Image: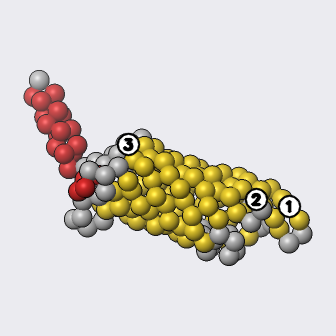
Amino acid sequence: MKKTVLTTLLLFGLISLSQAQDYTNAIGIRFGYGYGGNGGAGVTFKHYINSNTAYEGILHVHNEGFMAVGLMEIHEAFGDTPGLYWFYGGGAHLGSYAYDSGNGIAIGVDGILGVEYNFLPELDLPINITLDWKPAFNLLEETAFWWDDFNLSIRYAW
């Protein structure tokens, strides 16, 4: 009995210490500069699987092609500002691209590093804004490192 009570108290203590995210799902627009100077726009959907881990899906149109990206991200509080987080993670991309030698298929791995601000805690506004850097290494057709993918995302969160 003592072990059960102690375990329950420990779990409640850990839950109260963890930084809970301000929303579960968010969808919005994403635009920026990247892929060798050929910026573009797209849509983004983020879903939290627990208080600090999220999956993000991105559909991005650029340079006469498109890219579908799947990422797993870890979010941490950024200072004492409610709603402000930094995050990092990785995943993969699949799409098409217009290369110098013609059109091709793009398959590769992606990283992501960014900051996110959620207006929910302070203003009760279901909007968040993200600035991120998403480098990628393309493995198929044309092997390339895309280091210059900087983006702004604006999402409706619920």
Regarding mark 3 in the picture, which secondary structure is present there? Answer: loop
Q: Looking at the rendering, which quadrant does residue 40 occupy?
A: bottom right
Question: Image point 21% across, 38% down: which residue?
Answer: 11
Residue under numbered circle 3: 158
The quadrant the C terminus occupies is top left
Q: Looking at the rendering, which quadrant does residue 118 occupy?
A: bottom left
Q: Is residue 68 left or right of residue 12?
A: right
Callout 2 amino acid: Gly
Mark 3 and mark 1: Cα distance apart in space:
39 Å
The residue nearer to you, when weighing 140 against 155, is 155
Residue count near mark 1 (Cα–Cα under 10 Å), binned few <14, some 14–19, many ≥20: few
The quadrant the N terminus occupies is top left
Q: Position of residue 22 (x, y in %)?
A: 31, 49
Question: Image point 39% across, 56% down: which residue?
Answer: 128
Mark 2 and mark 1: Cα distance apart in space:
8 Å
Q: Position of residue 28 (x, y in %)?
A: 50, 52
The residue nearer to you, when weighing 40 against 137, is 40
Question: Image point 42% across, 55% down: which residue?
Answer: 74
Q: Position of residue 37 (x, y in %)?
A: 68, 76
Q: Which mark sits nearer the N-terminus, 2 or 1?
A: 2
Q: Position of residue 21 (x, y in %)?
A: 32, 49
Residue under numbered circle 2: 65
Is label 2 in contact with label 1 (beta carbons under 8 Å)? Answer: yes
Callout 1 amino acid: Asn
